[in-house]
């Protein structure tokens, strides 16, 4: 798989060439296996191949990988651990569930909770964004399912995106369709990737894009024809 370039850098872990390639072909003979480190928390599984320096972080929180406080906390801890592992240069975030990358913020976290709990949740959302955006590692979203609202934010916050082509999968900041306003920093993250005009239209109408449509609008430089990638 090939990925395009971005205007972010400044880390020793970024490849010298600005075009980077990630091989995700079949591993595995014995010496290779010994270089694999796995860790699993209830909602997130991480496999790091120290020989390539690439970790795959898989979301495994059925039914829809919604971003609950627990999920976000596990996500940040997993990312921090990889960040501290000098053998890790890049991380692919993806879903272990069929059809869904992430349904976005967990709606149940925003209903009937105490002000303290709401504050803790919102802080965790911001923490996820800050940690992912500020990561020293190359970050890649392999979007193998629907990715509305907060799920889209997570994908946009990565350096690169690849999306499985399936007409049922949509990605976008569709908050308007839900009667809520996307926070300004959600909007800014989208502007940074696709520009002002596309973002303005997408947010006003609460659009969800298919992979080919999103590709045309420069959300990414590659999409994957398999339904699972
Ligand atoms: C606390 C202070 C906060 C202050 C916040 C202030 C402002 C925030 C403003 C904006 C930011 C908001 C960002 C967001 O991300 S909001 C969430 C937006 N996401 C959605 O609306 C997604 C809605 N879901 C879907 O579109 C679909 O479910 C799906 C993801 C496409 C999957 O479809 P599918 O048909 O496969 O599944 P179901 O629809 O049958 O769903 C299965 C199951 O999952 C539950 N569920 C779905 N989405 C969520 C979710 N986001 N949070 C929690 N639970 C979710 C759904 O209810 C079903 O549950 P059930 O028990 O009925 O099986």
Image (spheres, rainbow, N blue to C red):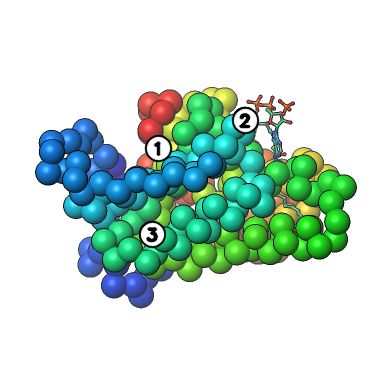
* Residue bearing mark 3: 82
Q: Position of residue 12 (x, y in %)?
A: 29, 72
Kindly indicate the quadrant of the structure image that contains residue 38.
top left
Q: Secondary structure at mark 3?
A: helix
Q: Position of residue 143 (x, y in %)?
A: 47, 39
How busy is the neighbourhood of tag 2: few (under 14 within 10 Å), some, or many (20 plus)? few
Quadrant assignment for the N terminus: top left
Which mark is drawn over residue 63? 2
* Mark 3 vs mark 1: in front: 3
In the image, taking residue 75 as reference, residue 5 lies left or right, namely left
Q: How many marks?
A: 3
Q: Mark 2 touching mark 1, by CB under 8 A? A: no
Q: Which picture quadrant has residue 16?
A: bottom left
Q: Secondary structure at mark 2?
A: loop
In the rendered structure, find residue 223 and report the number of the disc placed on it: 1
Residue 106: tell me if it is visible: yes
Please indicate whether residue 124 sits to the left or right of residue 80 in the image. Answer: right
């Amino acid at each position: 798989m090939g990925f395009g370039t971005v205007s972010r850098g400044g880390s020793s872990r970024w490849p010298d060439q600005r075009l980077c390639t990630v091989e995700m072909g079949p591993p595995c003979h014995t010496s290779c296996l010994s270089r694999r480190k796995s860790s699993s928390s209830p909602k997130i599984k991480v496999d790091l191949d120290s020989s390539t320096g690439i970790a795959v972080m898989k979301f495994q929180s059925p039914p829809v990988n919604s971003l609950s406080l627990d999920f976000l906390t596990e996500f940040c801890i997993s990312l921090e651990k990889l960040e501290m592992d000098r053998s890790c240069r890049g991380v692919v975030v993806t879903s272990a569930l069929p059809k869904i990358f992430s349904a976005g913020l967990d709606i149940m976290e925003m209903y009937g909770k105490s002000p303290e709990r709401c504050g803790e949740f919102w802080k965790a959302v911001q923490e996820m964004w800050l940690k992912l955006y500020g990561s020293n590692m190359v970050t890649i979203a392999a979007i193998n399912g629907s990715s509305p609202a907060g799920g889209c934010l997570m994908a946009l916050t990565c350096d690169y995106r690849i999306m499985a082509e399936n007409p049922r999968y949509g990605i976008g900041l569709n908050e308007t369709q839900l009667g809520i306003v996307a926070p300004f920093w959600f909007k800014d993250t989208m502007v940074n990737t696709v520009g002002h005009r596309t973002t303005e239209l997408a947010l006003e109408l609460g659009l969800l894009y298919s992979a080919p449509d999103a590709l045309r609008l420069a959300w990414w430089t590659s999409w994957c024809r398999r339904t699972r990638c």
